[in-house]
Image (spheres, grey):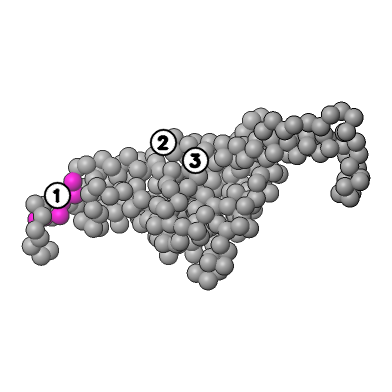
Amino acid sequence: MTASLDKTPRATVQPNFRTALVAEMPHLRAFAISLCRSRDLADDLVQDTLVRAWSSHASFQTGTNLKAWLFTILRNSYFSTYRKQRNEVADSDGQIAASVGVPAAQDGAMAMADFHIALAKIPDDQREALLLVGASGFTYEEAAEICGAAVGTIKSRVSRARAQLAKLLGLEIQDDSSAGPNLVEASER
Amino acid sequence: MAQKMPPIENVGMNRSKGSGVDLPDSDVARASEEGAARTARHEEALAERLRTYYSELVAEPLPDQFLALLAQLEAMEIEK
């Protein structure tokens, strides 16, 4: 380490960083399970994320969004490494149900079981965008930052994710997915 | 959205408008209102399932390995 001007010359991990990390663990795990569609793989991915976050905590700027920073590390790790492992496993509805821990098919849980299976079927980038914006509480702008994509691209992915889920679940929703900037998306890929 | 309804005697088949739909205007309006209401209901159902799905995952107990790993990372930090 070169001498730095700030008041903490040694980059020790601050207790509040640790506390914040622990607080985000359930969210990291929920997002990881959604991406991986496998609990085992998701738990590995979260631990990998924790190690990376811990070792690069010096690059995290206090006062900025820790949750977004952690989600970025996790999703980059997923798309660069874990997705390949994930894709080696063929999916059937039964396997998805078993690996994501779909609730037992009792009365009332059926709709949720179907939802788990439908969610596992939509493309990774769409599922990711939908989770970030529709469940994890990020804004479109934050999600765009996390994914390294344009805001319009994220909006388009979310719309298409919703449209596909609705179709798989037999729901009729307002379909604005074709209004998204699909050309932008196509040129970025 | 209080749409003014035409006087009863004017509610007829709308063939003359060339729409090809043999429904009284009031039925067409009702059908589209019902469609909009169903769409809104379905959209809420989808959003609700996504929230339920996510909150159930977040509420699950964390695997012991996570905290064990942090303890390990902290121990390495102290050794440095």
Question: Disc 2 residue type?
Answer: Pro
Using the image, name the chain to which the residue with label 3 belongs. B
Label 3 belongs to which residue?
A: B54
Q: Residue at x 50, y 69 (%)?
A: A188
Quarter holding residue A145: bottom left
Q: Earlier in the sequence, mark 3 or mark 2?
A: 3
The reply to whether residue A114 is in sight is yes
Most foreground residue, A138 or B58: A138
Question: Disc 1 residue type?
Answer: Ile
Label 2 belongs to which residue?
A: B61
Please rate how many residues cluster around mark 2, counting C-alpha atoms within 10 Å: few if below 14, some from 14 to 19, many from 20.
few
Q: Nearer the viewer, mark 3 or mark 2?
A: 3
Most foreground residue, A155 or B63: A155
Q: Residue at x 60, y 49 (%)?
A: A162
Query: What secondary structure is marked by label 1?
Result: helix
A140 sits left or right of A60 in the view: right
Q: Is residue A84 above or below residue A168?
A: below
Q: Which residues are magenta?
A: A9-14
